Amino acid sequence: MTAAAPLTIRLNATDNVVVARAEVLPGTEIPGEGIAAREPVPAGHKLATRTVAAGEPLRKYDQIIGFAKAEIPAGSHVHSHNMEMAAFERDYAFCSDAKPTAYFNDAERATFQGIERPNGRVATRNYLGILTSVNCSATVARCIAERFDDAALAAYPNVDGVVALVHGTGCGMADSGEGYANLQRTLWGFARHPNFGAVLMAGLGCEVNQIDFLLEAYGIERGPRFRTMTIQDAGGTRKAVERGVAMIAEMLPEANKVERRPLPASHLTLALQCGGSDAYSGITANPALGAAADLLVRHGGTAILAETPEIYGAEHLLTRRAVSPEVAEKLVARIAWWEDYTARNGGKMDNNPSPGNKAGGLTTILEKSLGAAAKGGTTNLAGVYRYAEPIDSKGFVFMDSPGYDPCSVTGQVASGANLVCFTTGRGSVFGCKPVPSMKLATNTAMFQRMEEDMDINCGPVIDQGMAIAELGERIFKRLLEVASGSPTKSEAQGFGDEEFVPWQIGAVM
């Protein structure tokens, strides 16, 4: 007979809270903790295992997640009503936990069915992209893409689609500085992304973000696979649409001339992402994705962690794994930038968790970050990059970005990610053309409720005691299938056209 699952989850012997697996009613004895619940504790929420004095740290994962506002008696529900964020010193201990990576040898390395481009870069999908230099050309771009429906593409079976990726900026902005650099790096990253077999860039003609400036700055050359136009030069909206349709039609036959073949997994660059997190995110899906990321790194690939505000309070765990003090310093510098950025804009780093996160049991950004950072696995931090900056290091790396998921993933894809894996506890729905996005559910109840959107259920870690390593292996194998062309749930639902969101910084003028 199967033993009953424990009522609570203890993550470390030093913790003074445990996590409720299911709703705990007042008076319920907590096995192994020597306490009884004083009040109702919702599933996923925390329960104090001993009396915590006012101002004393609360610990989970053997890390500080907040401080008691007032004395918290043993057995109490611990949440925003009695726990708060406060500043405390983190021991960055640069490079102290860095260790050699246990790479697989050549004979053991995994492969997938990929598409190799003439420049040697490798694709997991084969789209034609229509990029816009400015919001003013968004309608034209969408109208062009709409002309290439399934019937129009029937003669091109190796083309996954024609997608218009539009945005709300490109003018009314400074022509220099962080915001302009972010936009140009993002557009350049998408223009050269291997998942595009060909690209058309459409502008208005008089915008700040001139197409010619972008081409000159990044050495992009027009040719059969990269073409440009402006609405003003075309003679207006209708003529621009017709010109764009003709250009895409001319590029389709060549773009269709691809075939998949076995390629090493070292060509995969995985964007690690989470959204709609709950208390189980840091217990099931995130560490399981971290185990999959470790496998990818050991096979010679790259995994990109991002969302700087959502590693805040956990950054010391990454600096300890840095390959050099210089890499660790880059991460600390990005944290300092964010502290200044939020302060001068009247915000604060603890503007997170969201209402949904809190309903799922997360109380402070410290707690959320500790769970989110688990996506990064355990291998060394090999590099730290600015938003949309090209990743030129193999292994586990970090890219600076906001925590807003579409904006963060846009930067990761621009940096070179050709796969996305996205964990969620509350049920975020997401996709990101031209890159396939795989969804991991943190708990079985949500997976069953939203099974048409979720690719893998990570709930068995709690429900059945499945090992994180076993689940990580399953995620990794599915990633290889997705990279080989197997569609994800978000692709089947048609996601990906509206999630292109370059990070805007600076005044709108």
Image (cartoon, rainbow, N blue to C red):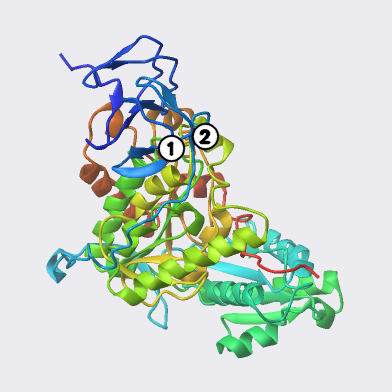
> In which quadrant of the rendered image does the C terminus lie?
bottom right
Taking 413 as reference, is 89 above or below it?
Answer: above
Q: Secondary structure at mark 2?
A: helix
Instruction: Please state which of residues 417 and 31 is positioned toward the viewer in this rendering.
Output: 31
Instruction: Please state which of residues 271 and 126 is positioned toward the viewer in this rendering.
Output: 271
For marks 1 and 2, give the one nearer the viewer: 1
Residue 101: % across, % down: 19, 66
- What residue sits 84% from the left and 69% below the top? 238
Which quadrant of the structure image shows residue 24? top left
Which quadrant of the structure image shows residue 260? bottom left
Instruction: Please state which of residues 93 and 275 is positioned toward the viewer in this rendering.
Output: 93
Q: Which mark is residue 15?
A: none
Which amino acid does the dot numbered 2 rest on?
Answer: Lys
Residue farthest to the right? 235
> In which quadrant of the rendered image does the N terminus lie?
top left
Provide the residue designation for mark 2: 358
- What residue sits 53% from the left and 28% below the top? 81
User: Would residue 48 appear left or right of 108 to someone viewing this image?
Assistant: right
Task: Tell me which numbered mark, 1 or 2, is placed earlier along the sequence.
Answer: 1
Label 2: few (<14), some (14–19) or many (≥20) C-alpha neighbours in 10 Å:
many
Residue 387: % across, % down: 52, 69
Residue 14: % across, % down: 24, 37
Taking 142 as reference, is 31 above or below it?
Answer: above
Provide the residue designation for mark 1: 55
Give the CA distance from mark 1 to mark 2: 21 Å
Asked if residue 123 shows in the view, the reply is no
Which amino acid does the dot numbered 1 rest on?
Answer: Gly
Label 1: few (<14), some (14–19) or many (≥20) C-alpha neighbours in 10 Å:
some
Q: Secondary structure at mark 1?
A: loop
Asked if residue 109 shows in the view, the reply is yes
Taking 154 as reference, is 334 above or below it?
Answer: below
- What residue sits 42% from the left and 82% below the top? 118
